[in-house]
Image (cartoon, grey):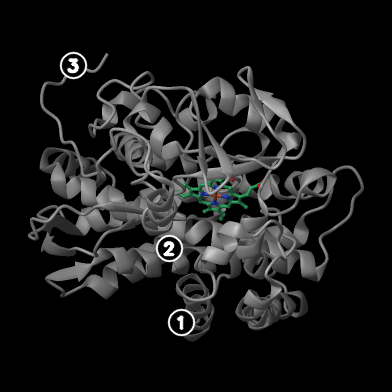
Amino acid sequence: MLDRTSFVVPPAPPVHPTDLPPLKLLLGSIRNSLAIFPDYAFDTAFSRSKAFGVESVLVNDPEGVRYMMATNAANFVRPGMTARIMRAVVGQGVFLAEGGEWRRQRRLLSPPFSPRQVSILFPHFIAAANDLADELEGQASADLSDAYQVAALNAVLRALFSLPEQDERSHIGGLVRRYITGPGRPQLFDAFATSETSFAFTLGRRRSFQKRWFAAVDSLVIARRSAPHGAGHRDLLDLLIAVRDPQTGEALSDDEVRDQCATMIFAGYETTARLLFWASYLLTLDHCEQSRLRAEVAAFPPERVTSLDDLNHWPRLRLVLLETMRLYPPAPILVREPVEDDEIMGEPVRRGVQVYIAPWVLHRHRKHWQHPTAFMPERFAGQSSPWTSGGAYMPFGAGPRICIGAAFAIFEAQIVLATILNRYTLAIEDKRPVMPVGRLTIQPSYPPVFRLEKARSG
Ligand code: HEM
């Protein structure tokens, strides 16, 4: 029971009284996919819509989500549009694999992503957090939206490859960011494509990017094969090279290791950067919460973190991150297509229809949450991993294909945010609300300038 009487309600796009007309719906879903939902979506379990003859379905209920993502997951696959955009960057890695091939890859990859194994990556997260803090040193203000993108990319590249060389990290990081703002941006052709390769003439830039990208990642994998680290595993690449299939004893080939590395970079960096941004933004709206977190972090500063248990010194920080992902889920909308005709919660769903699950809506659903639009971290008190409970909270997806990097992301975000809060008090002078804009992840409507004041405990 949440018994606070005052709380912050952070910005969100207006909710439409009824369904948008088809053209507005199409344009709206390209401009800001969070701004297209009608009011009734936040009360109902299931709805249908049709635009330009294309039918889609929104599943808004934990039972329906469980059916699609777990019970009958094999019948609900990622649509061709996802593969069109992601194939060039993730190759044949786990993100786009299906069926038996996906099961094999997931079995191999799960051990390196267990919380215990991820904790060997803490020195890399700490190094990335310190790089960020050093970068901000002496600045009175900063664009933290951009700074967190750089920091999250730095963290994943360090964790994967131990890359100490700034130049190498910048080269890889530059490629990643250019893809996202260039050929990787969803196009109108993607929305109308019926398969991964439809409108082949529009895929040239993605394919030529793929060549450069894979060559860059290949060179890191090959360099490690020829000069392995000594005893012990120091990064994810060591872990991936050491992986053996428990059923067959097989290792991953060089191409497979490359594709998994490429997958982790793309799946892991922007999502975590958005989490850091929105958590920081929320803390500028709720000064009490920010002070409370700073006191928590000052009592156990980030440089003391060496083990998983050390993170238990920051319970409130974890709650704030959980609540941030409820209000601003970094992956706000998931899409599936049924391979065969099916039924979700008694509703018939035809083969090929686009089925949406929107954590954005589910996390603000009036039947599942008290004060759904309010920022109240304590709602998660006593729940250490609420995304695994099969309820209405699913920032990391659900079922067997739930995000493999959840522990990685949360640990990294805890360490980076703790480092910033330990050094700075964050504020934003611009009074314009920062609106969430859905474009694959949740971006800010403009990058606000954060004022950085040296924290007294820092
Ligand atoms: C706050 C940060 C993150 C969020 C919110 C997030 C969210 C998600 C979601 C919602 C999915 C499921 C997508 C779907 O079912 O369509 C997913 C899958 C995935 N994520 Fe994450 N993710 C985050 C960080 C990471 C990190 C750090 C990594 C790796 C280092 C990662 C790797 C993956 C991979 C490989 C998959 C595909 C898993 C599969 O299909 O078996 N993610 N993520």
Give the number of the mark in front: 3 or 1: 3
Q: Which residue is mark 3?
A: 3
Residue name at image x 54 percent, y 29 percent: 388
Residue 233 percent location from the top left of the image: 66, 60
Chain-order first, disc 3 or disc 2: 3
- Where is 65 relative to 297, above or below? above
Q: Quadrant of residue 253?
A: bottom right
Residue type for callout 1: Gln
Q: CA distance from mark 3 to mark 1?
A: 49 Å
Q: Which mark is residue 152?
A: 2
Give the residue type at disc 2: Ala
Q: Residue furthest right?
A: 248
| Element under disc 1 | helix
Instruction: Point out the frontmost of discs 3 and 2.
Output: 3
* Quarter of the image that includes the N terminus: top left
Q: Earlier in the sequence, mark 3 or mark 1?
A: 3
For image coordinates 72% across by 73% down, the residue present is 228
Q: Are marks 3 and 2 in contact (CB under 8 Å)?
A: no
Q: Is residue 115 visible?
A: no
Q: Residues within 10 Å of mark 2 (few under 14, many from 20)?
A: many
Numbered disc 2: secondary structure: helix
State yes or no: Cβ of the residue under disc 1 lies below 8 Å from any atom of ligand 1. no
Q: Would you say the beta carbon of the disc 3 residue lies within 8 angstroms of ligand 1?
A: no
